[in-house]
Image (tube, coloured by chain):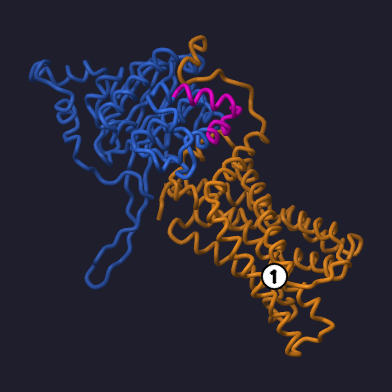
Amino acid sequence: MGSSLAAPDRGAVEQTVALDVRGVTKRFKRRAWRAPGRGRVPVRRQHTAVDDVSFRVGAGEIFGIIGSNGSGKSTLVRVLSTLLIPDAGEVLVFGRDALHEPLSVRPLLNRVSADPSFFRAMSPMENLLFFGRTYGLPGPEVRARSDRILRRLGLEPAKVDEPMLRMSRGQQQKVAIARAFLTSPRLMLLDEPTTGLDPRSRRDVQAFLTEVRERDDVAILLTTHDMEEAELLCDRIAFLAGGRIVAEGTPTELRRQVAARRGVAEVDMESVFMELTGREIEEDEESDDDG
Amino acid sequence: MTTARGTVGLVPRRAKPRRVALGWAFVERQTNLWKRYWAWELVWLVYGVVNTLAITFIAKEAGRTGLADPAHVRDLTLFLLIGTLAWAYLSAILDDMSLVIMWERWEGTIEHTFMTPVSRVVHLLGMSVFAVLHATIRTALILACSLPFFRINLEHADWPTAALVVVVGSVSLVGLGICTAILPMLYPERGEQMSFMVQALVLLVSGVYYGIDILPGWLQAAAHLSPATYLLRGVRAAVIDGSSVAHQLRTLAILVVFGVVMVPASLALFAAAERWAKKTGRLKRLG
């Protein structure tokens, strides 16, 4: 799929393109059992989780990746987060090579995943202090900024010194979002950040993302299977199926691709997804990231 | 782009942070965890004291029943006491280092920690500093709780030399600890048990509760590959015989060589294991 962002030369790309993903492929080998006649024989199977994926995200843009479970979204986010080494392809973050210079790329990005993982016995503030310090922020600054972000996200101030394990999932996810934005990322990777949240928490998070994008010019890559959220937040959307990007464009462009046959008013994003990918959004594909 | 930054979640970009400050993040985090899990620490302290007493009382029993010459009971008591304390110290370091991967897997934080802009060398050295401090405090508390149970004359002990041997020996123990931390990364299901196995082998060959001379020849050869053997030898010589630094130069030199070889080698091994885990997707796997 072609990207709407032009990249005439490397110098220009560094200023306008936050994330440039070129032909990324990730395969996992796994052991399976075959039963030829008598007895089971171990065989090595190869599963392609991400298959020749290319796209670009501009500075200040929210780019959505929609796919069903197992479509390769989380594997792709792990590659972009420098946590998985792909078998092929290139990832440039503001022009820096994420695969060969991960330490120079990591200060520019951060991530929120569906599972808000923390040191559960520690308080939100202790967790944020740790993660803030690893990005070179002094303690008082971490405290001040954490208070501000958590208040903005609607977390009660009394909660910041309680152990994380006493907090609800929605509250933990707000701390996860604070952890990610605390470090001044220029590229944010959001892997299903609102999954499992109650409607109010979801609205709080969505409003925060919109606000940050508008004020701070952060590029956001958002993976989700929530069509409404994708349409609400994303400037452009790509559909991922079987590890491949099968369609990409603005929500309106994607609707038009299907509407030619049925009329724009009749087409919702879920129908667009089903028609362009040949799958339902709730349909599970093969697990995408086991090793 | 930077003019509006900092309104909600972002802070202005700052100069490259100092490595010491980045490493300190891990010391502070482990200290916070230690405070939150104080009951576990208490359990380990009680276990350490009971273990020390149970083993060191063997010397008393040997003196009472005539198995040991009464003139040597003091030396035997000190020999066993130093062995149990050194083991408490060494196992605390190895335990803390093996948690570099395991603890983060339990909590699910491993990916967040590994995508921070901290080099792995700084990360591991930060964890090592905490491990050494933690082991020192725990061992000192075990010593303080155990000493009143024995009448030991320590006037011949050369404490500065003993401390120097522990400091120099700790460097190689950190190297050993980093090696054990690799196992849970390579083997998500069995790595924890494998790191216990490494500890057990070190316990067997290093002369913790007996001299290595009684071991079969091939195990004696293995004993010379364990830095704990030299650490124990040096501390015992300083505390029991009052051996000074001048008399322990050989032991100290061997420990320095162990440290110089083991720390860079273990860091290189860890880097190779991390790369492999990132290729195979094992970094985040729980088992």
**Quick check: B262 above or below A124?**
below
Looking at the rendering, which quadrant does residue A253 occupy? top left
Task: Give whichever of B282, B241 is nearer the camera.
Answer: B241
Please report the residue visible at 31 percent of the width from the left and 25 percent of the height from the top.
Answer: A64
Above or below: residue B250 compared with residue A79: below
Q: Is residue A274 left or right of residue A19?
A: left
- At label 1, the amino acid type is Ser
- Please, which residue is most extreme toward the bottom here? B66
Mark 1 chain: B
- Lateral position of residue A179 relative to residue A37, left or right: right
Q: Which residues are magenta?
A: A129-149
Q: What is chain B's hue in the picture?
A: orange
Question: Which residue is more in the foreground, A135 or B220?
Answer: A135
Where is residue A21 drawn, in percent x and y?
40, 28
B189 or B21, which is in the foreground? B21
Which chain has been coloured blue in this picture? A
Residue indicated by mark 1: B206
- Residue furthest toward the top? B3
User: Left of A47 or right of it: where is B236?
Assistant: right
